[in-house]
Each structure stands twice: as C-alpha cells, then as structure tokens.
Image (cartoon, rainbow, N blue to C red):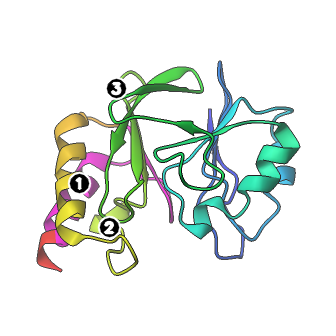
Amino acid sequence: MITNLAQGVQAFTSNVFLVSGDRTVLVDTGANFDAVAAVRSEVDDLDAVILTHTHRDHVGNLSAVKDAFDVDAWGYDTSIEGVDRAIADEETVRLGDHEHVALHTPGHKNDHLCFYSEAASVLFAGDLVFQNGSFGRTDLEEGDREALIESIDRVLERIDPGLAAMHTGHGPSVTTDPYDHVELSAQMARQA
C-alpha cells in the first residue's frame, strides 16, 4: 500500500510516500511539517528511508524521522550528510512488497534516483518528471538539461507502456496512462 503522507499539507514540502508491506519504507521525508506524527498515524515502525534525492524540500524532516524510528536513510551518495547507505544504479531495493530497480537519473540533481517495479507496475519518479509533461527544474545547482533529457529517455526505455502508477515528488500521483505523461515530459524538456 502506498500513501502520500504530505497530501493536503499547506507548506513547502515534497510528497512523502509511505510504502507499507514486507519492508515498510518512507520514500523521501518532506519538509516543514510533522512527518513523524504522519508516519505514526499510519504505522508503528519503519524499516528504512529511501531518498529520491537530497534537495531540502525532500529531506528537511530526515533527521527527525531517522531519530524517531531509528532507521537508516538510503540514497545515491553517502558523502551527503544524512545518507547512511548507498543505492547503486541498477540496484534492486525492496519497497513494501515489491522489488524496485533504482535508476540513477541526474539532471535535476546529481544524486537523483527513480525506483521502478515491473511486478507492481509502479514508478517513483522523484523530481525527474511530473504529470502533464512537466519535468524537474534544471536552473538549480547541479541542474543540467541535457542530462535530464537523457535520464527521462532512460526511464522511458525501462518502464512498461502499461505502467499503472507514477508517484512524483510534487503534485498528484498519475494513475491514468502515466507512460504518456513521461513521454510528454521527454518532449517538453526538449522544447523548453
């Protein structure tokens, strides 16, 4: 089960996805709201925090969540404060009841990861792509439009055209033809 704990929060934050099951994890911790209370309202414990990337709006609550649940944070770059365990490109990570392949997808930020489960037909896209052809900013430090386009193309090659759900770092999750939204993001990133 996947629940967006930041839904309805009136603060500058990323989405925060609680993925419950065999391995209960939090995908990103958000910022500027009580993520610990939000987690506790759903589950008693966490097995890990999984980070799509380390921009402040995605990790502002990281230390509070790690302290409250005594968990490690997994991300691409352990040289970044707060990231305890590295997830390599193409490494398989269990989120909930399903294995997800981690895809290193720089362009928005160098340590950006997307997580794709073919079995569950789910993509956690972080800030790479959003609904309706939107895509991650490249005007921030470490932003690179060409790298972003390559990353979107890489995800398009991996995901199934029948993808059931795409959970993004901001805005609503996409459950109607998410593949088409990723395709549109690839086109829009080239035009911008």
Q: Secondary structure at mark 3?
A: loop
- Quadrant location of the C terminus? bottom left
Which portion, as a residue range, is magenta?
Answer: 164-189
Q: Quadrant of residue 25?
A: top right
Please tell me the numbered disc located at residue 135.
2
User: Rounded to the nearest whole Å, what is the CA distance between mark 3 and mark 2?
Assistant: 22 Å
Horizontal side of residue 120 vs 16, given as left or right: left
Q: Looking at numbered disc 3 in the image, what kind of residue is underneath it?
A: Glu
Check residue 188 for magenta coloring: yes
| Image point (74%, 59%), residue name | 61
Q: Quadrant of residue 15?
A: bottom right
Image position, residue 62 (x, y; %):
71, 54
Is 66 located above or below residue 160 in the figure?
A: below
Question: Dots 1 and 2: beta carbons under 8 Å?
Answer: yes
- Above or below: residue 90 compared with residue 79: above
The tag earlier along the polypeptide, 1 or 3, is 3
Q: Is residue 148 left or right of residue 75?
A: left
User: Residue visible at 51% across and 64% down?
Assistant: 170
Residue linked to disc 1: 152
Circle 2: element type: loop
Q: Which residue is identified by label 3? A: 118
Horizontal side, residue 127 vs residue 190: left or right? right
Disc on the earlier residue, 3 or 2: 3
Q: Is 172 placed left or right of 34 in the picture?
A: left
- Residue 156 visible in the snapshot: yes
Given this view, does label 1 or label 3 mark the residue nearer the observer? 1
Asked if the residues shown at circle 1 and circle 3 are in contact, with their CB atoms under 8 angstroms apart, the answer is no
Q: Is residue 83 magenta?
A: no
Cα distance between the residues tagged 1 and 3: 17 Å
Estimate the spatial distance between the alpha carbons at disc 1 and disc 2, rounded to whole Å.
9 Å
